[in-house]
């Protein structure tokens, strides 16, 4: 069934270096690195947008940005962070590590893999090019609700076109991952021996393939309403405004899990490695992932409680049910650490930060899951706090854990430990300073997506705190990029398996050769590298 | 330096993580108390969820800190690797059972509150609320008056719409939108409902606390979303009656006499430059409409009243900046009402058709 053996010589040897070799590569490792570079570039852009927003909101009144500019900033901050940063970061790690983790030569469809990457910068730049057209960039929020999104100018068309490209990229990528994982595993690598990160990418890909086409269809419908005179969403011409929300959130809630499953996967592995123990319940994690994948299709209308047009008890109970498998993950992470020997290297620090912060993002979502309470906090800063505790406190901490964990494998160089620890503490302090006060702002009634707020409602001090926190986060990111810059100037000295890890990517050199493996160790469990190390007695540190 | 930072990590993390539950506890006092019985129910639900959530939060973070402190690898520790233990089905079942029990406790509380919030009551006051970019209009259906907000102009500041409600009386809001999706959000009611174009929705509440309460649109609706505020005044029954009388008088005092058959009307900052127009009876007339609002649509319609029961004239929408002249057939004498249909009563006025039939005034 699986087909990996010693590599055969390529008919046409790939050029080894130079710009052209990167532009034309079909090597999943190089494509993975391109994903990461592209994602971090958009991360800087979207992060600067966030800093500009927080600058405007630091004090009541209009200081820097009039509403027209502010509305474009928050729209593109959300759009870029979700579609061009968080998801492609996880997809980038998936690209690099899924074939390595299952002992494959490459992805199943290397050329489609290259295509799905290159659609991303094109799509992202299409969205950003809205700033160059009259009327400016898209300004209807990342959710783009019609009829508002049908009113706005050319920037909104560019937003639609860009998202269709990005959505197509993710669908192609999702199919590629599914085929790779189902068909390309090395001998002995059964489904229940696959690394948990690979499982998380499989679950993500199932969500992408089932949900992303719904978004693409919805975007085409808005586009044809705008440009071809169809009537799907505009009530003044006989359309139904709420239809978009049902389509968008049918994609949009599975999307939330596309944005976090990969982080759960890598954090699960990191916790096991740095606790010196196996995952407490491998089957439990897989079961939780699959339950969440299935349940995530039944909760979309909890984004629509305040419309008064959805079945409230049904979507409330499904939303609360999804917290059960999520809770199981927390127990498994804690039980994995229990009676282990914890090493606080930077990957583990970020993984622990992930657990501590994502827990808050999980719990504050419970209020919003109860419709009567959601009527009070929906569309307020409470929701902004909640989603950032999930996507920043959760996913971005997980991404940082993954960066510190896998950087030596990708480059042959260990990221600096001291700077990593500094980054962690600055980041976690800045993060909480920015986003915790938003809970209170939401409870005090401050709506989200406002360019300005009245000075007499007691919101000013908390907004100032939040704005200061945003710049502390920026400082942590400067430490991060400095660390990468300094590390890349050092010689390649990282060991093949610097952490004493478990999974197959650590059985090859750092960085791996083009063909990934010179030879594969026997695979008898979900920890083949651990098995190899303990057979030889002693090699961990 | 790096070493000292590294070795202090576990204790420092402990201190930071304990700040979390204290802050969360402080949050209980942050939720609005509510100015109606149902709002107070929602506040209570907030506290119930907090009581369930806080032990989960403290328990998980405490276990995390315990693992960090107790099971950290100490320097010079050469003892063999930890026991490679994994859990079986029983522990997995416990892991599923604990959150399942919490959900089973939580869900009924939420449902009970939801039923209270949605319980039907017979309203004394019925207000038809319309959102539009970027103001609100409140039509008091039984009292026959309406109030609307005014966007700021270069000479006048913004005037948010003022909603007056009698204390301790049930109010029904019939909500819709004239253009994009808005949301009627009164933080002190702990409630919001989306105003969706093409869709009518209703809800009731009974304010029981006197005062003036800030409220605003909660669904992003375009350029001036953040300025789409209004105020809710909960007043005594006597003050409410006095306000109604005053508003009625203000409407009645708006009048004007015919002066020719060529009318001119200018739309600027989503306002007309006149609140009263008059023409002689049974005589065709022209209305020159000038729309000075760039990119914004206006039109001109004549109705019997702001309830729009009977329409006498309507024009196509005109996108600014533009001007056009409309030809209107003669009307029988009486008091009529004109408005821009895009913005409704917020852009309206009295339309008087004089009884004389002659052009004098």
Image: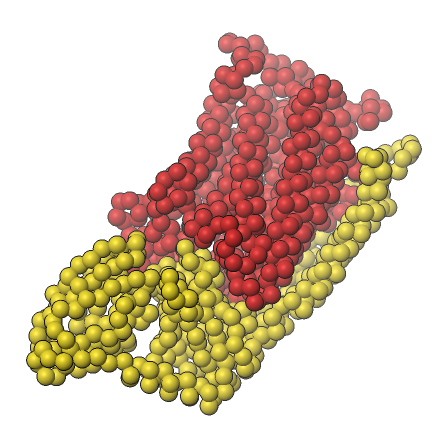
Chain colours: A red, B yellow
Determine whether, in the image, residue B323 is placed left or right of residue A64: left
Does any portion of residue A239 appear in the rendered image?
Answer: no
Residue B73, image x, y percentages: 86, 38
Give residue A262's quadrant in the image: top right
Residue A5, image x, y percentages: 62, 16
Quadrant housing the N terminus of chain B: top right
Give residue B86's quadrant in the image: top right
Determine whether, in the image, residue B214 is placed left or right of residue A93: left
Q: Is residue A56 above or below residue B125?
A: above
Relative to the observer, which residue lies in front, A74 or A342?
A: A74
Does any portion of residue A12 appear in the rendered image?
Answer: yes
Residue name at image x 52 percent, y 25 percent: A108
Residue A205, image x, y percentages: 53, 38
In this view, which residue lies farthest toward the front? B155
Residue name at image x 66 percent, y 15 percent: A518
Residue name at image x 41 percent, y 55 percent: B223
Residue A525, image x, y percentages: 72, 31
Q: Is residue A229 above or below residue A437?
A: above
């Amino acid at each position: 069934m699986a087909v990996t053996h010693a590599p055969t010589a390529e008919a046409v040897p790939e050029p080894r270096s130079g710009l052209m070799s990167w532009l034309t590569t079909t090597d999943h490792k190089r494509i993975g690195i391109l994903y990461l570079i592209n994602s971090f570039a958009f991360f800087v852009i979207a992060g600067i947008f966030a800093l500009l927003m927080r600058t405007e909101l630091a004090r009541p009144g209009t200081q820097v940005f009039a509403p027209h500019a502010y509305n474009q900033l928050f729209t593109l901050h959300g759009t870029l962070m979700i579609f061009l940063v968080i998801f492609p970061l996880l997809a980038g790690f998936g690209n690099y590590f899924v074939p390595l983790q299952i002992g494959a030569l490459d992805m199943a469809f290397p050329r489609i893999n290259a295509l799905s990457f290159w659609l991303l910068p094109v799509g992202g730049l299409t969205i950003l090019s809205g700033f160059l057209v009259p009327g400016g960039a898209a300004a209807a929020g990342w959710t783009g609700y019609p009829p508002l999104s049908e009113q706005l100018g050319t920037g909104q068309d560019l937003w639609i076109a860009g998202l269709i490209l990005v959505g197509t990229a993710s669908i192609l990528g999702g199919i590629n991952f599914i085929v790779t994982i189902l068909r390309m595993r090395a001998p002995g690598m059964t489904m229940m021996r696959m690394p948990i990160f690979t499982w998380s990418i499989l679950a993500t890909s199932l969500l992408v393939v089932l949900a992303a086409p719904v978004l693409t269809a919805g975007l085409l419908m808005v586009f044809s309403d705008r440009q071809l005179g169809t009537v799907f969403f505009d009530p003044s011409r006989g359309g139904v405004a709420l239809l978009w929300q049902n389509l968008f959130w049918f994609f949009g809630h599975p999307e939330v899990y596309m944005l976090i499953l990969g982080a759960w996967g890598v954090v699960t592995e990191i916790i096991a490695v740095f606790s010196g123990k196996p995952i407490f319940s491998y089957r439990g994690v897989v079961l939780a992932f699959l339950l969440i994948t299935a349940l995530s299709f039944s909760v979309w209308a909890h984004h629509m409680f305040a419309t008064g047009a959805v079945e409230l008890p049904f979507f409330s109970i499904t939303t609360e049910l999804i917290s059960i498998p999520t809770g199981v993950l927390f127990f498994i992470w804690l039980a994995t650490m229990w009676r282990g020997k914890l090493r606080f290297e930077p990957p583990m620090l970020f993984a622990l930060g992930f657990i501590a912060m994502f827990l808050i993002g999980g719990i504050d979502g419970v209020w919003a899951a109860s419709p009567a309470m959601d009527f009070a906090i929906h569309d307020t800063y409470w929701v902004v706090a909640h989603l950032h505790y999930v996507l920043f406190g959760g996913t971005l901490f997980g991404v940082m854990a993954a960066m510190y964990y896998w950087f030596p494998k990708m480059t042959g160089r260990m990221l600096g430990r001291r700077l990593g620890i500094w980054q962690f503490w600055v980041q976690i302090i800045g993060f909480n300073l920015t986003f915790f006060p938003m809970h209170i702002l939401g409870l005090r009634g401050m709506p989200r997506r406002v360019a300005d707020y009245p000075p007499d409602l007691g919101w000013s001090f908390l907004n100032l705190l939040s704005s200061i926190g945003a710049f502390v986060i920026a400082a942590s990111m400067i430490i991060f990029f400095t660390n990468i810059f300094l590390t890349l100037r050092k010689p390649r000295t990282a060991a093949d398996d610097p952490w004493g890890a478990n999974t197959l990517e650590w059985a090859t050199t750092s960085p791996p050769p083009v063909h990934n493996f010179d030879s594969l160790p026997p695979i008898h469990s979900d920890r083949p590298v651990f098995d190899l190390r303990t057979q030889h007695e002693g090699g961990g540190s | 330096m790096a070493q000292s930072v590294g070795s202090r990590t576990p204790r420092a993390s402990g201190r930071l993580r304990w700040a979390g539950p204290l802050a969360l506890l402080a949050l209980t006092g942050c939720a609005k108390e509510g100015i109606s019985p149902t709002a107070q129910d929602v506040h209570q639900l907030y506290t119930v969820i907090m009581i369930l959530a806080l032990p989960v939060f403290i328990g998980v973070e405490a276990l995390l800190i315990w693992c960090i402190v107790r099971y950290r690898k100490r320097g010079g520790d050469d003892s063999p690797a930890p026991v490679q233990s994994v859990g079986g089905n029983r522990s997995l079942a416990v892991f599923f059972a604990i959150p399942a029990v919490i959900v089973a406790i939580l869900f009924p509380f939420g449902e009970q509150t939801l039923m209270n919030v949605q319980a039907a009551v017979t309203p004394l006051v019925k207000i038809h609320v319309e959102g539009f970019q970027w103001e609100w209009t409140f039509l008091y259906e039984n009292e026959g008056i309406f109030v609307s907000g005014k966007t700021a102009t270069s000479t006048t500041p913004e005037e948010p719409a003022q909603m007056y409600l009698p204390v301790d009386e049930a109010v029904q809001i019939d909500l819709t939108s004239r253009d994009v999706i808005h949301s009627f959000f009164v933080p002190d009611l702990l409630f919001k409902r989306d105003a969706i174009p093409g869709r009518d929705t209703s809800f009731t509440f009974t304010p029981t606390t006197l005062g003036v309460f800030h409220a605003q649109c909660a669904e992003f609706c375009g350029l001036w979303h953040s300025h789409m505020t209004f105020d809710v005044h909960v007043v005594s029954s006597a003050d409410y009656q006095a306000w109604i009388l005053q508003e009625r008088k203000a409407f009645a005092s708006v009048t004007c006499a015919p002066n020719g058959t060529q009318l001119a009307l200018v739309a600027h900052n989503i306002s007309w430059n006149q609140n009263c127009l008059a023409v002689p009876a049974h005589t065709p007339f022209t209305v020159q409409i000038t729309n000075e609002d760039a990119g914004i649509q206006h039109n001109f319609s004549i109705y019997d009243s702001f309830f729009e029961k009977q329409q006498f004239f309507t024009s196509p929408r005109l996108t600014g900046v533009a001007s056009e002249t409309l030809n209107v057939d003669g009307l029988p004498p009486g008091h009529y009402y004109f408005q821009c249909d895009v913005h409704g009563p917020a852009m309206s006025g009295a339309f008087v058709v004089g009884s004389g039939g002659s052009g004098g005034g």
